[in-house]
Image (tube, grey):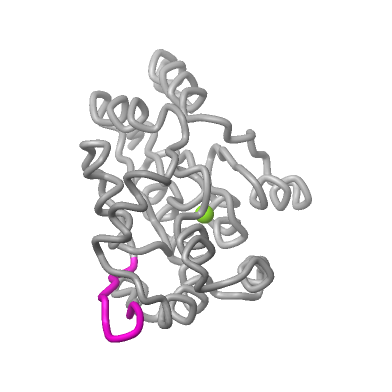
Amino acid sequence: MKKGWAAVSDFDGTITLRDVGDHLLLYYGFSDKKTIEASYSLKVRVEDFMKRAFAGAGLSERTIAAFVRSRVRTRAGFTAFVRFCGRNKIPFEIASGGIDLYAGPFFKKHGLRVKSFFGRARVVKGGIKITYPFLKRTNLSLFKASRVKRLKRAGHKVVFFGDGPNDLKAAALADRVYAAGRLYRLCRERGIPASPLKDFSRAVSFLRKKRSEPCTR
Ligand SMILES: [Mg+2]
């Protein structure tokens, strides 16, 4: 049965203009550019990098929340996109290797509620302990792909938004891809059709157009 479109998105560097985790680590001096650059190899599991990098990051919840409010910039059109999905009953979810400690303040700042998967972070002595309860026996890259697959199995066509190497598997399965940064280059290299992600308004136009088309594939 045809059910129309659904959307899945990465968070860091996709919904935000910069990767919030990297930005925090660099800003407070808990990591350096070289280490972060190396974490973007296709061979590195983002979730392992996050656990390691934040283990020694002595940041409080309050510091992180203030950082989100003052320094994190949102990609244009995101709030409108979430509202558009809500009004049109388009399932939308976020699958991220980022953490609740910055995602919470982010959604609060925008007054939004979105179904999402983020790492669970806890401030401990000397750093932040991260777990990914939703990963169980899989990794982040496969988890993102599994969210796209699940919606497709339910009869949806899926639009996917991402920016990183760990978004590649999900992008390859999606029916339409908006990609920024490294993901855009990887999609081009591998012949995966992708539109450059500048802001979310193009996706709204795309989905609006699809809604007005007759329900045939
Ligand atoms: Mg990202």
Residue 182 position in % (x across, y down): 67, 52
Count of number-bearing discs: 0
Q: Residue at x 62, y 60 (%)?
A: 165
Q: Residue at x 51, y 54 (%)?
A: 19
View extreme (bottom): residue: 125
Residue 22 position in % (x across, y down): 52, 62
Q: Nearer the viewer, residue 117 or 68?
A: 68
View extreme (right): residue: 189
Residue 113's place in the image compared with 199, above or below, is below
**Left-right relation of 177 to 10:** right
Residue 53 position in % (x across, y down): 48, 77
**Left-right relation of 100 to 95:** left
Residue 107 position in % (x across, y down): 26, 45
Q: Would residue 197 be counted in the magenta stretch? A: no
Residue 29's place in the image compared with 112, above or below, is below
Q: Nearer the viewer, residue 56 or 159?
A: 56
**Left-right relation of 185 to 1:** right
Q: Nearer the viewer, residue 217 or 116?
A: 116
Range covered by the magenta-colored residues: 119-129
Q: For residue 60, which quarter of the picture?
A: bottom left
Q: For residue 207, which quarter of the picture?
A: top left
